[in-house]
Amino acid sequence: MTHTIVGVHGIGNFRSGTQPPKAARILGEEWRTRLAGALDGAGADGPAPEVSMAYYADVLRQPGRQGAGGDLEDLDPSEIEFAYQWLGSFDLPVGVAAGRPTVGLRQAVDTIARMRLLGPPATRWFVALFCREAHAYLKNPDSPARAAVRARVTDALETTSARVVIAHSLGSVVAYEALWARPDLEVDLLVTLGSPLALPHAVLPRLWPAPLDGRGARPPGVARWVNLADPGDIVAIPPGGIGRTFEGVDIDEHTIIGTFDFHLAKNYLAHQRLGAILRDTL
């Protein structure tokens, strides 16, 4: 097996009081443990490869913001607008999300939670956290923070000479842009998990490089691109959107990852389908 995989985490991974290099090591070990289970379930031989984590949560942390980010009431107006752009992709009943911004937003989130058989409080927390972190990354295409986040990915690839990248959630957006920024970096396999890359209005139009006629493409240095998503994942929408929206996607597969915790990285990483894909590549 190849010695190293570069991992690119998603939202909710800031480790307060932990220096970024240590946070990267801890998260990399957590991912490796999950991947070991997936590979074992797929009948792979040998130990799981090391995971070099492109940790970037510290870069997106906004000094002076109160709380951990999981409260709709704490979102600023631009983050609320981002949330409406995201949630507008759902078929909400007429009249939902009207009125004062955060009141309407809470109503929209609770409606989606009921439609998807989710707990409203947990869904509100998740939506607030995703909107805060995704908007922090996407709001300015030329920001130093966005370039610094992408550099965490390319630095990890250069340091390890890894040829496989696994990116979850917002991390799939980061990895996509990082690999486009450095077409000289050759990657045998890019795996995106629970990806919002095809999310209309909120994410897709904000990508760099900008989609042409609403379509993106596999980064030029990537030989193979596989996307896995749970059909219940409220970030990975629209269903089948990655394959329809991006040229060069080899597999865009929707499979049940977790009955309830369908967006969690640990469930994607431990899934036997991912293990089979890695077994056949490493």
Image (cartoon, grey):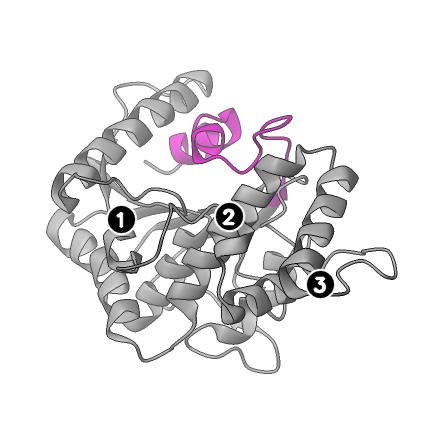
Residue at 11 percent across and 51 percent down: it is: 159
- Crowd around label 3: few <14 · some 14–19 · many ≥20 (10 Å): some
Q: Whole-percent x and y of residue 155?
A: 16, 57
Q: Residue at x 49, y 48 (%)?
A: 226
Nearer the observer, 66 or 219: 66
Which corner quadrant of the image does residue 63 belong to? bottom left
Could you tell me which residue is drawn at 54 percent across and 38 percent down? 263
Q: Three-letter amino acid code at disc 1?
A: Arg
What segment carries the magenta color? 253-280
* Circles 2 and 3: CB atoms closer than 8 Å: no
In the rendered image, which residue does mark 3 sit on?
88
SS class, disc 3: loop
Work out whether mark 2 precedes mark 1 in sequence or the reverse, and give the earlier one: 2
Quadrant housing the C terminus: top left
Q: Is residue 185 left or right of residue 122?
A: left
Extreme residue toward the right, this view: 94
Find disc 2 in the rendering and name its residue. 71
Does residue 80 appear in this view? yes
Q: Position of residue 132 (x, y in %)?
A: 45, 58
| Amino acid at dot 2 | Asp
Residue drawn where x is 43% and y is 73% of the image? 139
Which numbered disc covers residue 4?
none
**Mark 2 or 3 closer to N-term?**
2
The residue tagged 1 is 163
Residue 264 colored magenta? yes
Q: Amino acid at mark 3?
A: Gly
Is residue 273 covered in magenta? yes
Q: Choose the circle earlier in sequence order: 1 or 3.
A: 3
